[in-house]
Amino acid sequence: MGDGRQGGQRLSTAENLLRAAAELLESGGVDAVSTRAVAAAAGVQPPVIYRRFGDKDGLLDALTHYLLQKYVKAKRQILNTAADPVDQLRETWNLHVEFGLRHPDAYVLAYAAPRPPGELGAAAKRETVSLLRGVVAELGNQSKLSMSVERATRYVFAAGLGTTLSLLQEPPDERDLEISELARENALSVILHRKPKVRARNTKLPARAVALAEALRGTNDLPMSAAERSLLDEWLDRLADQKG
């Protein structure tokens, strides 16, 4: 690795360091990613790391961003190929869990580290959530949500995170991967508006409130003041999140 080459092309110093750090993380966990070990693996002197990233926390922040960008790229590919937003949610859920199980230390560093990520890592994490929100918002546009876009996004993210971390607690040969499928379908059943067997009063109201909120989100020429618009948004979210 010390020659800093990949596919016959010389890597930048920063990318060479991050690739070395990623390999150390994969093989030995966060504790293995010391500035000295990364420098040795990348074939540079430790001061180079300090000049590039400031300190170990800066290195871990950049590493989180580096790892999540690979995940984001794969997620975008799914969103560009699957047309139905429900299918997109299913496939991106599967990708999220697969990423966590294949790269457990990277996953914990990105999503469950005791200390919150720095600026770079936080930006990458926000991008993953933003992509999820885009899919959920499309469901809202189609009047398929039983709650607000924000609540549905948070619910799916929390459910996926909890499922992945729960599976990571178990030895690989003892994991019941069908739990992920069950959790995924349960999450969908919670956020999606389903036609009831017996028609109940106001069952479609939350879905309609979400659809209206999303339709108005990009509209700036409504005949109302900013305060009135804010109040309307609050009312629509309250209707979207009502129970029963």
Image (tube, rainbow, N blue to C red):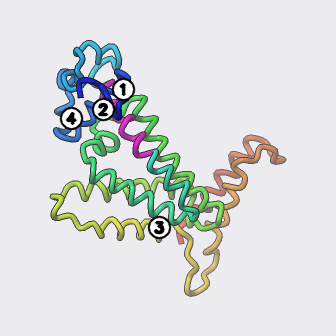
Disc 1 or 2, which lies upstream in sequence?
1
Which numbered disc flags the more N-terminal residue, 3 or 1?
A: 1
Which image quarter: residue 93? Answer: bottom left
> Which span of residues is magenta-colored?
57-72
Q: Earlier in the sequence, mark 4 or mark 1?
A: 1
Residue 199 percent coordinates (x, y): 61, 84
In the image, 154: left or right of 6? Answer: right
The residue identified by callout 1 is 11
Frontmost of labels 4 and 1 is 1
Q: Within the magenta stretch, is there residue 151? A: no
Report which residue position mark 4 lands on: 24
Q: Nearer the viewer, residue 164 or 210?
A: 164
Residue picked out by circle 3: 188
On the image, which quarter does residue 6 sit in? Answer: top left
Q: Reply above or below: 174 against 213.
A: below
> Which residue type carries mark 4?
Leu
